Image: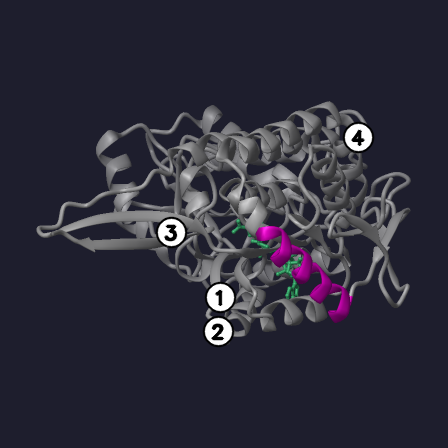
Amino acid sequence: MRQANLIDGKWVEADSGRTLEVLDPATDARVGSVPVMGAAETRRAVDAAAEAFPAWAARPVEARAATLLDLSARMAAKRAGLAALMTAEQGKPLAEAEAEVDYARSFFEVAADAVHTLEDEHPEVPGKSIRVHRRPVGVAVAITPWNFPLAMLAKKVAPALAVGCTQIVKPAEQTPLSAIAFAEIAVEAGVPAGVLNLLTGAPAPIAETLLEDPRVRKLSFTGSTEVGRLLMRGGATNLLRLSLELGGHAPMLIFEDADIESAVRIAMAAKYRNGGQTCICPNRFLVHASIHDAFVAALAEASAALVSGIGTRPGVALGPMIDDAAIEKVEAHVTDALRRGATVVTGGGRRKVEGAADRFHEPTVLTGCTVEMKCWREETFGPVCPVRAFRDDDEAIALANDSEYGLAAYAITSNPRRIERLGLELRTGVVGINDPGPAVAAVPFGGVRHSGFGREGGRWGLEEYLEIVTVSQADG
Ligand code: NAD
């Protein structure tokens, strides 16, 4: 397993020789260690990306697309190894890690296809001939979180490379090894030296150097709203183009016409993926009063049956929380809810797993949740389902919109007029109707308000890495 960084096509260590240990969150076993890069190495990565840019941008679209497809095929060939590494450093069950490899690959296939649709436009203007064309912004930066180590990277690398940008990626400290394995595959697929560069280590020195450098023209960040704000301030000096995919606090609305069994199936799939550590997992369950008790009973039964454990063990559906701070936050949200009058229907605390670290939380269903509770206001990022009842659509929509976040919302209903209304009135960037997985590579994904801005997926994702040029020629 490679553990070095990639700058200008060479595998390198930190100038200081310093490294960062990567531990398995399920067992605390050492998985590997990666370099801690500083300002000098970061500047060298920008040098390499800036130098590689003109040739990569000038390459025919078909050639860039072919490289992306080759990369995807190589990921498919290494699916098992990539998934095992992801489970080791991130903790998610192996089946979820395998599905993530497939999901990550789909961004390369979509980008390789969508890049062919970016054609020049010729708006009609009397007395002029106009050509509107798009060109790559230049050197792009990707900063990614730990919860989807490969997919979050793929969402950023695929569109950037497809349109001709060069890139510097900085994965999360917890999960850098999946990113290194990915970069190794990119090199094997023929991504030229300098086109993709990878830096690991503490985020601040790397990010500060990147933000200060005027050659960097684009930053795509997925992570917390707090760090997103910091990067937006830092990007102001060079008026950096930004895409910010930030925190979420998704409501799931279950209406009176929902079939309980399928509502629970959808809720379980959306909620417990990655142990509830996803930006779009439902954090607030709003259930019509007429089916509240039946839904809660079925959700609690299904939740209690989930098996927690080390992700490589058969039958495991719930892995560990990523670190101690994460499980402490989940506990704090549950304690706060109970103190303010919520009731635990199932779960409520830590779960012991034989031979594993003390970092597993029981799947938990809480009823009687109110807007003052932390679990109702903040992202819990764990396997907790806070539930409250509503009486009519107006109340449900008002409660759903009562959050500063606006990434995803879900609804279970088959009423067409209501579905139309939800699409218009829910203040989120993504709305899943009877759909636990609305994030697919071919469609735009992203938030509004404090969940950020910018879209990933399809041609919308490519546009984030392009600037528009208008050539206006006077006739005659
Ligand atoms: P985080 O913001 O702490 O870290 C994300 C990345 O930012 C990591 O690479 C980290 O090293 C880096 N970072 C941290 N401090 C930095 C700094 N000062 N300067 C530059 N970079 C810095 O978030 P996290 O805890 O790793 O991830 C969880 C968060 O990500 C949640 O809020 C979740 O909702 C969000 N998320 C959002 C999406 C989305 O698409 N909207 C997807 C996944 C996760």
Amino acid under disc 4? Gly
Please tell me in which quarter of the rendered image ligand 1 is found: bottom right
Residue 47 in magenta stretch: yes
Where, by quadrant of the figure, is residue 288 drawn? top left
- The reply to whether discs 3 and 2 touch (Cβ–Cβ < 8 Å) is no
Answer above or below: position of 29 versus 204: above
SS type, badge 3: helix
Q: Earlier in the sequence, mark 1 or mark 4?
A: 4
Q: How many marks?
A: 4
Q: In the rendered image, which residue does mark 2 sit on?
A: 236
SS type, badge 2: loop
Which one is in front, 449 or 14? 14
Which mark's residue is nearer the viewer, 4 or 2?
2
Amino acid under disc 1? Leu
Which region is colored magenta?
A: 38-53
What is the crowding at mark 2: few (fewer than 14 residues within 10 Å), some, or many (at least 20)? few
Residue 43: which numbered mark, if any? none
Q: Earlier in the sequence, mark 1 or mark 3?
A: 1
Q: CA distance from mark 4 to mark 2?
A: 40 Å
Where, by quadrant of the figure, is residue 461 drawn? top left
Q: Is residue 430 visible?
A: yes
Residue 400: which numbered mark, if any? 3
Q: In the rendered image, which residue does mark 4 sit on?
A: 81
SS type, badge 1: loop
Q: In the rendered image, which residue does mark 1 sit on?
A: 240
Which one is in front, 377 or 130? 130
Q: CA distance from mark 1 to mark 4?
A: 36 Å
